Amino acid sequence: MMINLKKIQYQISKKTILDNINLNIQDGKTTIIMGKNGSGKSTLLKLLNQIIKPSSGFFESNLSKPVPMLFQKPLILQNSVIYNYQILKQIKKHQINHSWFEKFNLLNLSNQKMISLSEGEKQKIFISRIMSFDQSQLFLDEPNQSLDLQSEKLLIDLLMKEKKEKTIVMTLHDFEIAKKIGDYFIYLENGKILVQDKYENFFKKFPL
Amino acid sequence: MLDTSKVFEAIIISLHVSFVSTLFAFSISIFFGYLIATKKFILKRYIVSILGSLTSIPPVCAGLIVYLIISRSGPLGWMELLYTPSAMIIAQFIIIFPIMVTLIINYIEREYPQLRDELISYGASQKDILFLLVTNQKGIYLTTLLIGFGRAVSEYGAAAIVGGSIDHVTRNMTAMIALETAKGNILIGVTLGAILISISLIISFGINYFKNDD
């Protein structure tokens, strides 16, 4: 077990965003959180990564603090693409792993200004930025958003390799991608878990 | 006849007073803007509302308030600030501080939650977050500086009340324009107006150059 949640509730200004969440995130597995817009997926991901604290309930994690996470609206640091890496090195004091940067073929964008890039290019930079931390736990909020089909396929291939040695928790809208990558699935509706199960059982309970 | 030495003097007085008041207001605005936007405390909503309302304070009223405080019979009369450039700086500060701090609060309130969440996940300290909050959108701060300076350098009423338009001491460009026009020297007034507009434009272009250099 990596993260354990029991009867978790999360409220903002008296509005319940997550309610009665009971969940186990398994070490070394890929967990996919799905659900409609506004169902609480991003909030649950932030809660699992300890960016936000639950309003009530039991929370246990073997991570002592948050790990670098891909947000749905990632932070755009102005200036050049390469600055986005260098500044994080300064903050985290980590050795930058450039492999995803190279795999996404972003080297030719190094000196370009972030503002001049397309949404898809930015997304690839945000994903590579998170992967540059080379951590063993990944929290990814809709990593495939804005990507073209070719880049999406590359992302899936790369994640398939990563999942062998990492614990991944991510939100997704695309059931086909989820089926390829996921080991364990959660479906949220109005802040509550509607279905959660392993691959084989989830899609039986949740026929599409 | 236009006395060029007097014009230069007025330009120097205008720039000196406006630069100091703008930089002073900007520094305080960043400090309070950050505190107000990022902390939760009682009366926060009211403070933000009051600052928002003060953005439209009539300069003459700001001048009058400063006058009452620093005049001989006022609480700070003993400091003998009336009719000095310092009095003009204080009056301009009162006019531009609410504008600058409100702009900075709005920017930080909008950017901070997202920036904080992501940077916390990277293990950033509060110092790192503040650094990136300031450096990531230099354009916002340069625009705030420009708006503050523009308001300060073009202001007449407050500076005239507390500065007194004293020749060689507190007669800035706007005071000189008003004086020459009142004397019927329209051409001199227009020339001085053109010089003031040119100076403002040069400074705006300079700031915009840095802004676009992000």
Image: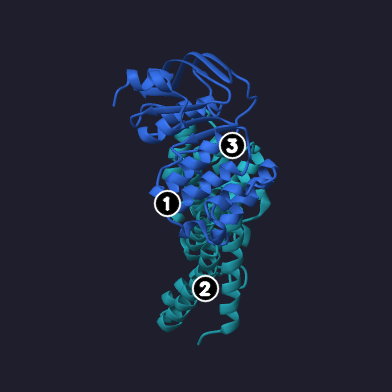
According to the colouring, which chain is cyan? B
| Residue at 53% over, 60% down | A109
Structural distance between the alpha carbons of marks 3 and 1: 21 Å
Structural distance between the alpha carbons of marks 3 and 2: 44 Å
| Residue at 56% over, 78% down | B7
Dot 1 falls on a residue whose secondary structure is: helix
Instruction: Identify residue type, mark 3.
Output: Pro
Can residue A193 be seen by looking at this rendering? no
Disc number placed over residue B202 in the picture, else none: 2
Dot 3 falls on a residue whose secondary structure is: loop
Q: Position of residue A2 (x, y in %)?
A: 59, 21
Colour assigned to chain A in the rendering is blue
Q: Are marks 3 and 2 in contact (CB under 8 Å)?
A: no
Dot 2 falls on a residue whose secondary structure is: helix
Q: Disc 1 designates what residue?
A: A119
Output the chain of dot 2.
Answer: B
